[in-house]
Structure formats: structure tokens, C-alpha cells
Image (spheres, rainbow, N blue to C red):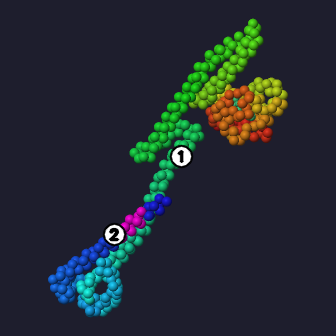
Amino acid sequence: MLFVVLCMVITSLRLVTYSNSINSAYHDIQLIVSVHIDELNDVLAADGVKGVIQRLPVMLRESGDVHLYMGVRAAGEITGNLHVWPKGDLNSHRWWRMTLPYYPAQAETDIYFRLIPLDANTQLLVGYDLQGVELIRKTLGNVLLDNAVLSVVLSLTLVFLMLWMLNRHLQRYNHVCEQVMEGNLDYRIRLHGHSDQFEKLSGNINRMLDWNCVLLDTVKDTSNAIAHDMRTPLSRLRLQLRSMAETQEQPEKLREELQGAVAQLDYMVTLFDNILKIAKAESKEARTLFEYFDLRALVEDVLDLYESVLEEKNKPLLRHMTGQSIHLLGDRHLIGQSLVNLLENTLKYSPPETPVDVFLHASAQEISLQVADRGAGIAPELREKVTGRFFRADKSRHSEGVGLGLCLVNAVMILHGGRLSLLDNNPGLRVELSFPRK
Ligand SMILES: Nc1ncnc2c1ncn2[C@@H]1O[C@H](COP(=O)(O)OP(=O)(O)O)[C@@H](O)[C@H]1O
Ligand SMILES: [Mg+2]
């Protein structure tokens, strides 16, 4: 597109140059012809038609210009250096063209002329041949044609250079967008210290991302601080209300109210606990607390704890794992909590008397921990949303929960460089936690 526009501009400039040169050659001819007509008009005024007929050969001789053509036709006879006369009744105010045929000592030639009536039977013709104009037309045409190839090559190179440069800059901008969208919030465009607008844009994008990080940290710090500061007084309040509810002197009605208030506080404490755990999993310092531990032993411990809870709902817990230890570098509390969250979900979202399968496999590349149930599962279009903060599917709102369980699991997996996958268990949900083996 750019190339086409450039070619059009160059071609128009060339056409303008070409037509300007031709026009100026015509203008010169008009000037010469007009000077001679003026001179002969003066002769006509002083000496009449006869005077003009006498003066004409003298002027032709004196000028010595072989391109100049002048003639007077009186009663069918031509005086001057013309041997033919234009046919028809030609307007004296216009410029005309005609071709003079070959004549001994004169090649065929085109002339540009004016026809002036001297009296009723006499006409004056003054013209100039177009050899000069033809010469300009030919030479300029050839030069422009020769240059055309060069300018097409040059403009093509220019367009490719510009597109290449633009493409390089756009790639840098796209790359930073992709990195930030993938969660690499610290990624920045490398600056080269140039003073062009692209460098300025890169600097501005970097500053904007810096500012976003500052704002994001402020929001995170504020919500974590609120969660942290609220947790202790809420826990105290909960304890006080519980001990009041347990006092036998309380009337039954008041005890029920107090138990309701304790349940509300439980919800709030869980909410703040989860917010703080997610904040811990998302903090950069969390990796400094990593240590090697036996994942198989941790999974067995959590399953032992939950087996009885599942049994209460007649849900058999089926373990599929080898007896060997699996060593993993990570945060055992956060991984343990993740497994608890998944087991809690199978309790809430799969019907009683359906089994829960837990798989633990380790290959050379990765360790895979899976929890599968036979519930309704999660619709594919909701799978991305359920790992966000506070998201709960509409049909799950009747059950207890704050919508932070899978969000924490996801944060824990990112912290460990692993992946959380929500799969189909046909029927039910199969959640897979895969840890890379470094
Ligand atoms: N095992 C499961 N089967 C069906 N739906 C599930 C399962 N686990 C999670 N979900 C859906 O994902 C949503 C988010 O889960 P989670 O983050 O653990 O929050 P919560 O358990 O507090 O609702 C749940 O509200 C539920 O709709
Ligand atoms: Mg949950």
C-alpha cells in the first residue's frame, strides 16, 4: 500500500515536470510569433497591406531563423516561406497546428501558428515549427523512463526498510503486552537511549507498567493489612460469643442467636485466612521458605485426616499411589492446604456415596497429584473463571464457601512453577496439580 502511494507520488511529480517543460516550450513559441505579428501590425498601420508584403521577405532574411514561418496570401497567391496554406475559415484569435508536407529543401514539419486577416482578401500567417517541442518531448520522456526503474527500486527499498523498522518496534510492544498478560508483571522494554518517538513510547509504556505495579502492590498491601488486622479481633469476638452460647443459663433462643453469630464470624475468619494464604503464595518471599519434603507422606497424612470426614458421607476414598517417597522442593503447608481445598470441594460438590479417587504419580519430568470425584463437574466455559478470586458457580451458592479455594490452589501452583488443570472425569471433575521436576 505504502509502495503504491509512493509510486503514485513519484509518477505525479514526474508528469508535472514533463508537462511544465512542454508548456514552457509552447510559451516561448507564442512569444516569438507574437513579436513578429506586432511588428507586422506596425508596418500594416504605416504602409498598408503592400508594405507588409514587401517587409515580410526582409524580416525572414534578417531573422535567419529556419524554424520561423511567415506568409501573406492575397488573391490566392502566397508570399513568404510557406508553400501551402491552411484550409478552412480559421478563427484569428486562436492558435492552430498544421503539418507542412515535404517540399524541396524542407522536411515535413508541424507548425504552430496564428492567422491574422489584413483586409477582406488578404491573410497573414505567422508560425513556428514544433521541432524544439518534439525534441524536449523525446529527450525528457526517455530520461524519465530511464529514471523510473531506478526510482521504483529505490522506493521499494525505502518501503521495505520502513516496514522492517516499524515491524521491529511493534514486535517489542507486542512482546511486553504478552509477557505482562502472562503474569510477568516485572517485564519491561529494553531502552537503547535513542531520542526518537519509538524510544519515548517505550519509556512511557515502562513507566506506565511501573505505576501499575505500584498501584497493584498498594491494593494488595491494603487488603492484606485489613485481613490481617481484622482476623485477631474477629477470632476473639468469636471465642467470646461461643463461650456465651455454651453457658447453660442462657435461654434457648439467645443460644441459637449466639451460635448463628459464631457461624457468621467463622465465615469471616475463613475469608480473611484465605486472603492471607493467597497473599503468602503470591509473595516473592514465599520461595525463600521452600524446603525438601516427602510429598507422598504429606498426601497420606491429609488423606488419613479426611478419610473419616468422607466416610461420614459414605464416600469411599480410593488411593492410587506407589509406596515410594517423592521428594519435592516447596512449601509443604501451602501444598497440604491445596489438597485440603480440593477434598473439601469433593465433599461439597459431589453427591454422597460416590467415591473420591486420589492419584499420585511421579515421572522423570513431573509429579502429578490428581483428585477426581463423580459430581456434576465444572462446565468448560467456567473453568478459567473458577480459579479467580471470589468466583462461585450459581448452582454452588447454596453451599458454604467463599470462592477462594481454587484461587489459592492456582496461586500455590504458580509459586511452585507448576500447573493447575481442571479436567473432565466423565462424570465429575478431575483436578490435576502438576509439579515440574527440576
Ligand atoms: N469438585 C467440584 N465439582 C464441581 N464444581 C466444583 C468443584 N470444585 C469447585 N467447583 C466449582 O468451583 C467454584 C469455586 O470453587 P472454590 O474456589 O473452591 O470456592 P468455594 O468452594 O468456596 O465455592 C465452586 O463454587 C464450584 O462452583
Ligand atoms: Mg472450595
Element carrying mark 2: helix
Identify the residue position indicated by label 2 in the image. Answer: 20
Which residue is drawn at the image coordinates 63% and 29% (left, top)? 278
> Magenta part mainly helix, strand or loop?
helix
Measured Cα–Cα span from mark 1 to mark 2: 48 Å
Q: Could you say which quadrant of the image residue 375 lies in?
A: top right
Q: Residues within 10 Å of mark 1 (few under 14, many from 20)?
A: few
Q: x and y percent of residue 78 in the render?
A: 26, 91
Q: Closer to us: mark 1 or mark 2?
A: 2
Q: Amino acid at mark 1?
A: Asn
Element carrying mark 1: helix
Identify the residue position indicated by label 1 in the image. Answer: 174
Q: Is residue 333 left or right of residue 132?
A: right
Q: x and y percent of residue 141 in the render?
A: 38, 73
> Which residue reaches farthest left?
46
Q: Quadrant of the C terminus?
A: top right
Q: Could you say which quadrant of the image residue 336 lies in?
A: top right
Q: x and y percent of residue 399 in the render?
A: 74, 28
> Relative to 358, is 143 above or below?
below
Closer to the camera in the image, 264 or 36:
36
- Mark 1 residue's CB less than 8 Å from ligand 1: no
Write the start and end of the magenta stretch as one range.
Answer: 9-21
Which residue is drawn at the image coordinates 69% and 41% (left, top)? 381
> Relative to 414, is 271 above or below?
above
Q: Amino acid at mark 2?
A: Asn
Tally the marks.
2
